[in-house]
Image (tube, rainbow, N blue to C red):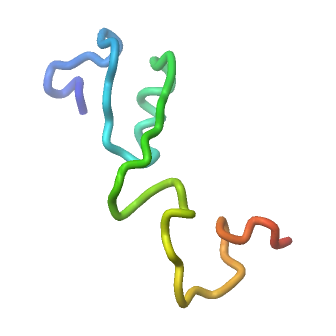
Amino acid sequence: MARSVGIDPQHKKIVVVKSSVHYRAAYEPIAKEIIEIDGPGLSSPNLSRFEFKHIRRPIFPLDTDFEW
């Protein structure tokens, strides 16, 4: 996406991307380091931030000690 507007991420010291996972395919090959930030919002890789109610158990990844 950045390249489509004339920005080459390979020539930038820092690139900030608001995304959940799909950015890795484009940036892992060129990144020295990836730092994930868990900002506020509707989604997060840190599932402990959410209070889950009325869900069938066991459910992955909340119940990782369950033998599937």
The image shows residue 40 at horizontal and vertical percentages of 34, 55
Residue furthest top as drawn:
11
The quadrant of the picture occupied by the C terminus is bottom right
The image shows residue 37 at horizontal and vertical percentages of 43, 41
Q: Is residue 23 positioned above or below 29 on the image?
A: below
Q: Is residue 16 positioned above or below 13 on the image?
A: below
2 on left or right of 60? left
Please tell me how many numbered marks the rendered image carries: 0
The quadrant of the picture occupied by the N terminus is top left
Is 29 in front, or is 54?
Answer: 54
The image shows residue 52 at horizontal and vertical percentages of 53, 78
Q: Is residue 65 positioned above or below 2 on the image?
A: below
Q: Is residue 7 positioned above or below 43 on the image?
A: above
> Dividing the picture into quarters, in which one does residue 60 lie?
bottom right
61 on left or right of 8? right
> What's the residue at 48%, 28% (across, down)?
34
Residue furthest right as drawn:
67
> What's the residue at 56%, 63% (across, down)?
48
The image shows residue 55 at horizontal and vertical percentages of 57, 86
> What's the residue at 45%, 56% (across, down)?
44
58 on left or right of 45? right
> What's the residue at 54%, 90% (across, down)?
54
> Dividing the picture into quarters, in which one does residue 47 lie?
bottom right
